[in-house]
Image: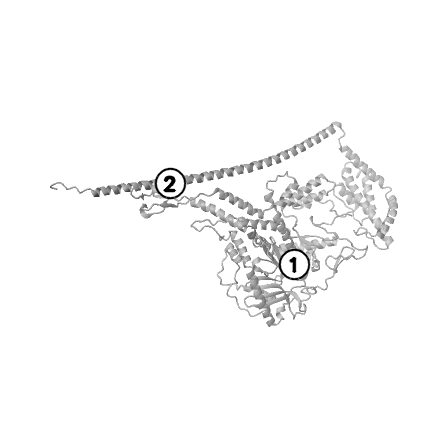
Amino acid sequence: MADMPIPQDYDRHIDPIEDMGALGEIAEVHLFDESIQEMDDGSAVVNLDDLKTPEDSPDFYSNMAEELDSYDLGDIALKYIELVEKDKEAREERDKQYEDGLRRTGMGNDAPGGAQFNGASRVVHPVMAEGCVDFAARAIKELFPPDGPVKTKIAGEVTEQKTKLAERKRDFMNWQLTEQIEEYRDEEEQLLTQLPLGGSQYMKMWYDEGKRRPCAEFLPIDNVYLPFAAANFYTASRVTEVNDLTEDEYGVRVASGMYRDTDIYRASQEPEQSRPEKANDRIEGRKSENENIDGVRRVYHIYTWMEIEDDKESGGERAPYILMIDDQTTEVIGMYRNWEDGDEDMIKLDWIVEFKFIPWRGAYAIGLPHLIGGLAAALTGSLRALLDSAHINNSSTMLKLKGGKISGQSQTVEPTQVVEIEGAPGVDDIRKIAMPMPFNPPSAVLFQLLGWLTTAAKGVVTTAEEKIANVTSNSPVGTTQALIEQGAAVFSSIHSRLHTSQARVLKILGRLNRWYLDVEKTDMAQELGVTKEDFERNTDVVPVSDPHIFAESQRYAQIQALAARAQANPNLYNLLAVEKRILKQIKLPDINEVLPDPQDVKEMNPALENVAMTLGKPAGAFPHQDHLAHLQVHLDYAKDPVYGANPIVAPAFIPAALEHIKQHLTLWYLQRMDAYASNSLQEPFNILKVQPIIDKAQQLLALSSQHLHQDTAEQFQGMMPVMQQMIQTIQQLKSQQQPNDPSVQALVQTQMAETQRKAKNDNDRLQFEAAKLTADTQAKQEKNVADQQIKAAELTHDINLLTLEQQHEQQRQQLQAQQEQQLQAQQAAQAQQEAAQPPTEPPQGV
């Protein structure tokens, strides 16, 4: 077809490029530098002869530690080991914050705080762990869908050549990240689960000579050191990456030439763990015996700027290098230039990408421990206090009067057991011997405080679904969209930063493909026809995530709005494209099978096109066809009473044929205009190519149009009556389908009125339900306030009652003490009287 669209991603954004230059000449497109030129046919020429890959210039990318003087390397090692130690000390408090966040998840059973008595609760409120899991689940779904994390985005004029190039790069990179780099998704998921706790986390990409493929590794923030004065990760004067390698891994790197071969001895002790590593080991249930059976040793990879006088490539100027130092021997085992060969500006190459949660003033971003660490501690404390209170109130804690004892000296009474207890002289009530401790029951006020703290903590990392839980299907789309954006304001900004970081990862992967794709020689690369030259420019592949859309609910709201607008204005929208977007959003597989594209047609001869249109299948016209011959065949078929003019054929054939004839007429018009213009210029005019029309071309087309008018009158003189007859046939068919009976028309009007009445009733019902929902919400709020007041009054009454009982008990004890004192006084007085009386003489004879 003449206007057959080039298949693209649904949500691809195209930035137009203006000022393409004069007709038929080369137009330079300054997208990056003057080395990129776009030709008039839409192709691009990239002149990167000055830049060389590691294969082209192995000496440039070789290990400089093999060539430099050992004395100079020793000085460099001592200097940077000291700097690394200072950088490590500068971020000790940061490691403590990360450790505190890991502990407050409760997964390591060592969350700080809590009571210390036997049986005290060690439960931890899950707000911190829930925030990490919820964030990671939503982020990985956006960044890494099942089909892969890469889509196409073509800048400038969209041509078939550019589209095919971008699509094969997209397919190849998606295959790399989903299958070839088998660890990538796992590493990215680890990064996303740790990102809310650390604030900043890092992803490293490099090419592994042994595996002959790109590799990816998650670098936790405690394994990346930045200088104290650094304000940004990418502009820091040095970045230190901590590598803890087993003896086997270290040997593999020495054998590959990455590290120089030096006299080393086996590490007897494991490297010192950071505080977050120790906290994570408790979560994973790991414990090291410190025997270092794997020979783990620590190597620092330092991305820094240095002035190496002996480096002829840099000329002794300040340039970026990668310095590798063995911590155990304090020797430089690797030094590499960190810019591309031929780059006179010596621009630093990035191998580590930073992912940020919430950016702050310094180089490190902040996470949940900084945002809700205090709230998480308060939640855990409140929850433990409630559980401890319930535990104490259900325990058999009491006070026993001195002098009372249980037979057998047993202090534990089992259920259903009968035990005798001895009381002191004069005690006739067992309640006078033992008294339960008057502990306070679980506080209702504390329980309410726990709910308020939970709401406040979750409000920081809330998601869209939580904000629209009460939104009905009849709610306006704009309201739903506003609630989503308001509810996920924090997450949307984080998602936008993740999208930018993912783009940096793809940039590094594209560079590795440009360097090493011919070395890999994978079957997939050959099948897709991908070469390393395809990756000279990588602006046509971007992350599949959309920084403006961060939740499925938001996509559904947009699709709902699109469907409503398309239904209201069907003439302005491509209804097929709208339907495909809806089916794609609901994850329906094989969309083209259930909803074929009528424009996706194959070229056929005119006879097969007649058959296809008769059977209700699409047919399309193509620029290079003989349009007059096609028109003649179609019109002969249309006026034949057995075929096109047959009442059983015409309803399906004629509408499709008129649309098809329109395509041929349009393309014949363009074909004739191009022929006249080309003859006048004595060179191909190429009118089908979209390009600016200069003044000369406008005048040329004006003259061609006059000749074309004469050709049209001659060529279509006999065809026009047949087309008019086809149009009349269609009009007659439509009039036959319309009801002419007044009763039928009245019935139609009645049905329309009923439909309008139902629509009005539905609208009134929706308004009533909205008002009812508002009233119910207000009533619930008032009821909650009343319930809280009642609970507070009950709590006050219980407290007053308990206080009154305690007062009565104190009065009873005082009265009892007074009685005992009076009794003792009477006994003492009686004893005195008896002592004062003279002794009675016994009778005689006794």
Q: Residue furthest left?
A: 845
* Of marks 2 and 1, the one in the foreground: 2
Q: Residues within 10 Å of mark 2 (few under 14, many from 20)?
A: few
Residue 518: x percent and y percent?
68, 61
Check disc 1 and give the amino acid type.
Answer: Ile
Depth check: 308 or 566 in front? 308
Tell me the tag on residue 585. Answer: none
Q: CA distance from mark 2 to mark 1?
A: 79 Å
Residue 508: x percent and y percent?
65, 58
Is residue 640 shown to the viewer in this render? no
Q: Quadrant of the C terminus?
A: top left
What residue did someone put label 1 on?
508
Asked if labels 1 and 2 touch by Cβ distance under 8 angstroms, the answer is no
What residue did someone put label 2 on?
809
Q: Residue furthest top?
A: 743
Instruction: Tell me if 577 is positioned left or right of 87 in this view.
Output: right
Depth check: 485 or 588 in front? 485
Q: How many tags in the picture?
A: 2
Q: Residue furthest front?
A: 836
Q: Residue at x 76, y 32 (%)?
A: 738
Above or below — where is 325 with respect to 620? Answer: below
Residue 788: x percent and y percent?
51, 39
Instruction: Tell me if 211 is positioned left or right of 721 in this view.
Output: left
